Amino acid sequence: MGILKTAIIGAAVYAGVKYITKKDPITGQSIVDELMDKAPEWVEKAKGYTEELKTKASNAAEDLTR
């Protein structure tokens, strides 16, 4: 039973990897390529949200100390 379960999980992982690395015939990019292209943009957005959250936290701390 254990070897059958391992084989099924392995097949599912293999199919998933093949799917996300398959090149699109129109654009020539895979899902992984698109994610790697968008990652720097997401990092910049996350930095903005981090700064905004720090500002809100410091403002809340100042309000609580009054």
Image (cartoon, helix red, strand yellow):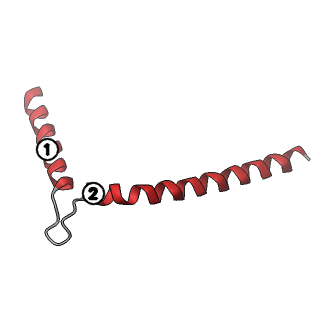
Relative to residue 21, is residue 35 drawn left or right? right
Give the image location of residue 22, x and y in percent.
15, 57
How crowded pointer 2 is (Cα within 10 Å; few <14, some 14-19, many 20+) is rated as some
The circle drawn on residue 14 is 1
Residue in front for this viewpoint, 29 or 9:
29
Q: Label 1 vs label 2: CA separation?
A: 18 Å
Label 1 residue SS: helix
Q: At 18% across and 65% down in the image, what residue appears?
A: 28
Mark 2 — residue? 33
Front label number (1 vs 2): 2
Q: At 25% across and 59% down in the image, what residue appears?
A: 31
Q: At 80% across and 46% down in the image, what residue appears?
A: 61
Tally the marks: 2
Give the image location of residue 4, x and y in percent.
7, 32
Amino acid type at mark 2 = Asp
Relative to residue 18, is residue 45 drawn left or right? right
Q: Residue furthest top?
A: 2
Relative to residue 49, is residue 34 drawn left or right? left
Q: Sequence-wise, which precedes: disc 1 or disc 2?
A: 1
State whether residue 50 is above or below residue 9: below
Q: At 46% across and 57% down in the image, what residue appears?
A: 42
Q: Quadrant of residue 9?
A: top left
Amino acid type at mark 1 = Tyr
State whether residue 19 is above or below residue 5: below
How crowded pointer 1 is (Cα within 10 Å; few <14, some 14-19, many 20+) is rated as few
The quarter in which the N terminus is drawn is top left
